[in-house]
Every structure is written in structure tokens, then in C-alpha cells.
Image (cartoon, rainbow, N blue to C red):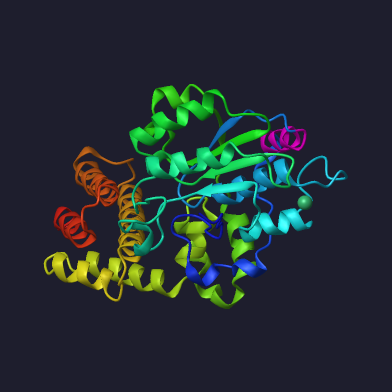
Amino acid sequence: MSARWTREGRNRPAAAAPAAASARLQRPLGQGPAFAAWLRRARRLDLPHALVVEGGSGVGKTTVLQWLAAALLCPSELATEEPCGVCRTCVRIAGGGFPDLHVLERAVSDDECKEGAEPRKSYHRITVHQVRDVQERLLRHPVEGRARVMIMACADTMNEEGQNALLKTLEEPGAATFLLLEAQKPEELLPTVRSRVQRLRVLPLDEATIRRELQQRIPARAAQHETAAQLASGSLGRALLACTEHAVQLHDLVRATLATTNGLRPLATAAAVLQGQKEMRTSIEAARTFLWLLRSELRRRRDALAAAESAPYPASTAEPWTTWLESTLAAERELDLLIPPEQVLTACLLDCRGA
Ligand SMILES: [Zn+2]
């Protein structure tokens, strides 16, 4: 498996994706003194052997992981606080071509899920085949770095067999070997795994920082910045996603759906969300984006209603909103369980009828 590392979160918008060749290591924003202390330890190779980097979707876990991996691997003797970010090692870490950095992630194409593909991958799980494959590679000596680093994206989706296989490496990782696990829901990891790792929580960004970053990164889409910052809940990844044309279209669809309480057509709406998505992966991403926007819009309306009634969520109002919001969360979990996106969306929209 090649150590590809070009993603920037699960819902990363294609428009904001830098090409691998021109990838630059990004310094994480707004992570404070606790993270600075972890970085100094990484520079001294004094990091715990296994660390779970946790936080909500799109909050910047990937950027934090990459910077931390670079802090372990960057050979610059002048950079004692953090990686230099510009040496050949740092550049290759950003581009996904550094031999001592092993990246595990779920499948991103249909080919990787096919019978006979080595190691077998899945769209939904980190498989035991992937865990065993990386364990073999971690047994070898570092090729050129000062350490060997494994980054596992979406480690909370690792199947139970995979987690049990990983225990061996967590107990005896070998010299200068570091496992960095990314997890949105660390509670999904087995207690035996959790007891062997330390945790680093990625902090959400404030709206002003998000607006400033959007202004710098995608000034051409200024019309979307304000809405995107409000929808983002502290996540720059989500803010960038909200500025893409596709997300703007899906947001319009959410508003149109909620505007037609009597004429809501779940099947037609699900078809509109998934229109033009040819691969399973992109269908799931479109469904996730729609569900996130639907939840944000439901929350906004609930809060507006509560404010108008000048009481926080009166019992009569709170109950149906809670049901609808929970329905969007349940739908996201169903996407993880291989249930077809059109079915998930249709069922969720039936639940939200009357919102
Ligand atoms: Zn460097």
C-alpha cells in the first residue's frame, strides 16, 4: 500500500483539495499550549507510543496528525518546538511519499474493495487485513527517518478483529515506533485498546478564525462565508465544504424540503441528493453532507422558535425537534452500516415530515 495522505477530513471538498505534488504541511490553527507541549515531546521522540487524536468531523484532526507525525520525523536540528515544515522530509510527509510514515485509511475507490485487492479494504471499516499489513511493515527498520509512524484515519471504524490484532503492537510497539489514531468517536474503541492509548482532543475554532481562513483560502466564494461559518460548528473542514457549489445546492434542497411540509416527497428528495453520484463513496458523502445540513437547519429553526417563545424549548416544542434531530443522527449511523444511502435518506425524511 502506498502511503497516500491527501485527504483533509472525511467530507473534504474536492475544490479545496491541494494536489499531492504541491501539498504543503499546514500548521494546525488554534490548538493552544497543551498541543505545543505534545509537539515538543514529539521532537524529543518522547511521545507515548500510542495516541488517539479525537474531535468532531472536520475539526482539523488530519492536520494535527500530519503535523505531529512531522514533529516525530523531521530531521531538522534547529526546529525544537515543532517540525520545520519545509525540509524534504516535511514536504514528502505532506505529499504522502515518506517511507517511514504508514497511513491506514478506509477504501476511497471501488477497486480497493474488490476480491483479490491487497490488503482488502472496505468503505466502512478499517479491516484486520490492513492492520496486519501495517504491522508487518512496522517490524522493518526505519528507511531514513528517526522513527516509524503509523497514522490510522477513522480508527473508531476498525473492526473488532482488527482492534484485537492491534493490541500486540500497542503492547510491544518496538523502538521509536509511534501509532497515531484518529477517532471521531473514541468510545467505539474496545476498552482493551483505550486503556493502552493516551488522548489528545482537537479544539474547535471560533467563528472569527473560520471567517478569516475562508477569506484567505477561497476569497472568490465570499458570498458563502457567513453562512458557512455559522454552519461549521468550529470546523474549518465543514466551513470549506459548505462553500462548495454542491453543498450550496444541497442546502437549497434542505430549505426547499422543509418549506413544503405537506408536499414533502422523501423518495424524490433522496434521488435529488444522490443525483450524479456514480460511486458508493461519493453517494455516501453526498448523503452525509445533506444530513448535516438538514440537522443544522433543524437546529436553527428550533432555536429561533424557542427564542420567539422566550423560553428555552418548551416541552410542547422540544419533543418533535429532538425526534427529528435524532433521526438525522441515526441516519448517519446507518450509512456506516452499509445500508444504501437512498434508503437511509428516504426513511429519515419520512421521520422529518411536518418539520
Ligand atoms: Zn522538516
Say how many tags the image has.
Answer: 0
In the image, 168: left or right of 21? left
Rendered view: 292 above or below 21: above
User: From this viewpoint, is residue 54 visible?
Assistant: no
Q: Quadrant of the C terminus?
A: bottom left
Residue 265, position as x, y percentages in the image: 14, 68
Q: Quadrant of residue 311?
A: top left
Residue placed at 38% from the left, 40% from the top?
A: 128
In the image, 316: left or right of 236? left
Residue placed at 73% from the left, 47% from the top?
A: 144
In the image, 9: left or right of 42? left
Q: Main secondary structure of the magenta part?
A: helix
Report if residue 126 lies within the magenta region: no
Rendered view: 112 above or below 306: below
Q: Quadrant of residue 213?
A: bottom right
User: Along the line of sight, which residue is nearer the eye, 293 or 54?
Assistant: 54
User: From this viewpoint, is residue 303 visible?
Assistant: yes
Rendered view: 284 above or below 263: above
Q: Which span of residues is magenta-colored? A: 34-44
- Taking the view exactly as shown, the residue that stands out farthest to the right is 78
User: Along the line of sight, which residue is nearer the eye, 298 or 134?
Assistant: 134
Report if residue 37 lies within the magenta region: yes
Residue placed at 30% from the left, 51% from the top?
A: 302
Residue 209, position as x, y percentages in the image: 62, 55
Residue 307, position as x, y percentages in the image: 35, 49
